[in-house]
Amino acid sequence: MSLRIALLGLLDATGPASGYDLAKSFERSLNHVWQAGHTQIYPELVKMAADGLVAVESEGARGRKLYAITPEGASQLRSWLVEREPSSATRSEVALQAFLLPLLDRESAIAVVERIRARFAERLTVLECKPKDTPGFGRYALRLGLTQGHAGLAWADETLAELRGASDG
């Protein structure tokens, strides 16, 4: 359902787009919160058109279709945003590795946390390059990502200090 909602949201925010355009939009914006590639986007657009949530506005060369959100699609998007309680279920490999760290010797655990820390730092570098005061689409998700990235770095630094301190005792 979330891919469908993400596509409806992109179409609502940016206007009619092709599957290719939507995949590029994912890469530029939503990729930090939801990943989807061409192989997922194109079949989902076909299903959404069959369900009346999007319509093919035009067809171009080589079968390129321009999709637009329908009133029913806009209504479903709004209902999802206003009424749905977001899932708090988390599937995080970072959290799983953090949970299982005690299974490793100290040096290996430190290496794992350093690798995780580098990923948080890398993500923050990318997010911090994005304009933060841009009104509208994506602004709040960017702030959430920045907050989560900083929290991840703080966790990694505290964990590394604890692991390194354990070698002193």
Image: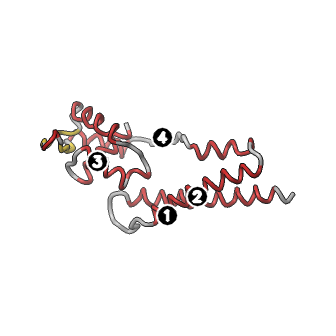
Residue 168 in picture, x, y percent from top left: 85, 60
Between marks 4 and 2, how big is the CA–CA gap? 28 Å
Between marks 1 and 2, how big is the CA–CA gap? 10 Å
**Residue 35 located left or right of residue 77:** right
Please tell me whether mark 4 or mark 2 is closer to you in this view.
2
Name the amino acid type tagged 3. Answer: Leu
Q: Residue at x 35, y 55 (%)?
A: 28
Q: Residue at x 42, y 46 (%)?
A: 34
Tell me the tag on residue 87.
4
Tag 1 and tag 2, C-beta contact below 8 Å: no
The answer to which quarter of the image holds residue 156 is bottom right
Tell me the tag on residue 22.
3
Q: Along the polypeptide, which appears first: circle 2 or circle 3?
A: 3
Up-down: is 98 above or below 114? Answer: above
Tell me the tag on residue 118.
2
Between marks 2 and 3, how big is the CA–CA gap? 30 Å
The answer to which quarter of the image holds residue 131 is bottom left
Between marks 4 and 3, how big is the CA–CA gap? 24 Å
- Viewer-closest of 121 and 145: 121
Identify the residue under disc 1: 125
